[in-house]
Amino acid sequence: ASFNNPLASSWVQVSQYACQRRTPLQDINGIFTDAFEILAENYEFLENKGPCRGFQRASSVLKSLQFPIATMNDLDGLPLLGNEMRTIIEEILEDGKCSRVLDVMNGERYKSFKLFTSVFGVGLKTAEKWYRMGFKTIEEIKSNPDLKLTKMQKYGFQYYEDIGSFVSKSEALAIYEHVREVIWKLVPDAVVTLTGGFRRGKEKGHDVDIIITCPREDKEKSILHNTISILKNQELLIFYDIIESTFDNKKLPSKCVDALDHFQKCFTILKLQKKKEGTMESMNSDSKIRNWKAVRVDFVIPPYKQYAYALLGWTGSRQLERDLRRYANHEKNMMLDNHGLYDKSKNVFLEAYTEQDIFKHLGLEYLEPWERNA
Ligand code: DCP
Ligand code: MG
C-alpha cells in the first residue's frame, strides 16, 4: 500500500455510487478530473453515452478523494478506474498532460460543440447542425440572417458576454434576495430557496436556480405568474419562458435517469443592477454604458409535498443525481425522480418533507449539500 493513500492500507471501500461518498467542493485531483471530464464531454458531443458515463464516474470517484494522486499505487482499491483511465492518469503523472485529451481539445468538432452549446438555448442538435454547416465562430452565426433562431437563442447571442461570464455568489445572493422580497409580499409564508451549485457552496455558477413553494396546498400555483409580472413592471425581466406543470400523479417516477422533471418552471434572463459604475473590469463597450448585467435565472415551483424531492434534485450535482437514481434502482428496487420515491417491492410512494427523510428511505448516510459536489 502506498504512503499517500490512506484507503489502500485499510478495508475502507470507496463506493461506486457518488451518493455513498462525501465530495467537497475543493477538488485536489483537478489535473486528472479535468482530463476525464473533457473526454466525457467529447463522448457526449458524439452522443456516445457509455464511455461518457464511464469517464464521468471515474472523474467523480477522484473528486471524493482527500489526498492527491501521486503514484499509481494510490489508485489501489478505487472503483470505476479501468485500464483506459489508468493509462491516462499514468501519462499525466509522468508528463503533466495527456496527449489524448489535448487531441480532443484541439479537435474541430469538440471546439465547435463547446462554443455553440455555450449559447443559451443551444443544445446538441443545434450545435450539430451548425457544425455540419461549417460555422466556426459565434460572430458568423450571429450575423447570418438566414438562420432561424429560437427566441431563447436570440437572447443567448444578444447577451452572450454577460451570460458567459460567471455569476458570482454575491450576484446570485443579490438576485435571490430581491426575488424573495417580491415573493414574500405576495405570499408571506412562501418557501424560497437558492439551490443548484450555489447551495453546494460554489463561488460561481452559470446561472441562479431558485425553488419556490408554499406549505398551504395550492398556494404555490399563483406565485410564478405574479412574480413574473412584478419583475416585468420593475423592468428587470429581459426574457422569460414559462413551462406549465405536466405532472401526472398516476405515473411512476421516470425510468430515464436524465429526464427533466414536470414542475411548473420558468427560464429567465434578469437584469442585475450593478452597485456602482466600473465595478466590473471585464466589460465590453456595450455593457459599459449600462448599469446592469444580464443573468440567467431559473425558477422551479413544486407543490409542498414534493418540495424535498425537488430540492434534492435541483441541488445536484448532476453526477450525484444520476447516482442517487442508479442506487435507488439497482440497490433498493426503488424509483427516484424529482417528484418522489417509489418502493417497487411494497408498491408505495414514500413521503418526505426533508432531504434527510429521503436519504433515510434509501438507507443512505445523509450528505450535506456541500458534500454533494460529485
Ligand atoms: N438538474 C438535473 N438535471 C437537469 C437539470 C438540472 O439533475 N436536466 C439538477 C442538477 C443540477 C441542478 O439541477 O446540479 C442545477 O442545474 P444547473 O445546470 O444550474 O447546474 P449547477 O447549478 O449545479 O451548476 P452551474 O454552476 O453550472 O449552474
Ligand atoms: Mg445552476
Image (tube, rainbow, N blue to C red):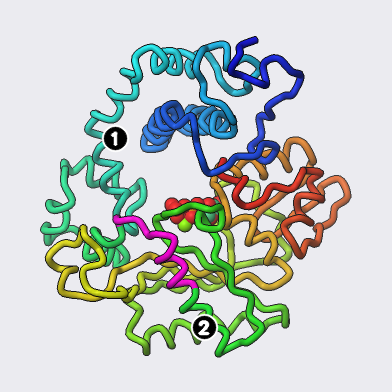
Residue indicated by mark 1: 110
- Main SS, magenta region, reads helix
Give me the C-alpha separation between circle 1 and circle 2. Answer: 42 Å
- Image vertical order of residue 300 relative to residue 146, above or below: below
Q: Residues within 10 Å of mark 2 (few under 14, many from 20)?
A: few
Residues shaded magenta: 164-176
One can see residue 259 in this view: no
Instruction: Name which quarter of the figure residue 192 lies in.
Output: bottom right
Could you say where residue 349 lies in the image, as x and y percent from the top left?
A: 80, 58
One can see residue 114 in this view: yes
Image-based side of 118 in relation to 76, left or right: left
Q: Quadrant of the N terminus?
A: top right
Instruction: Name which quarter of the figure residue 308 lies in.
Output: bottom right
Q: Residue at x 59, y 34 (%)?
A: 64
- Mark 1 against mark 2, which lies toward the viewer? 2
**Which amino acid type corresponds to the residue marked 2 in the rendered image?**
Glu
Question: Observer-nearest residue: 31 or 127?
Answer: 31
Q: Which mark is residue 337?
A: none
Image-based side of 136 in relation to 7, left or right: left
Find out whether the residues at labels 1 and 2 contact each other: C-beta distance under 8 Å: no
Q: Which mark is residue 181?
A: 2
**Which amino acid type corresponds to the residue marked 1 in the rendered image?**
Tyr
Question: Observer-nearest residue: 35 or 222?
Answer: 35
Q: Is mark 1 within 8 Å of ligand 1?
A: no
Could you say where residue 28 lies in the image, as x and y percent from the top left?
A: 49, 32
Q: Residue at x 32, y 76 (%)?
A: 273
Label 1's element? Answer: helix
Q: Residue at x 38, y 32 (%)?
A: 38
- Image vertical order of residue 37 relative to residue 214, above or below: above
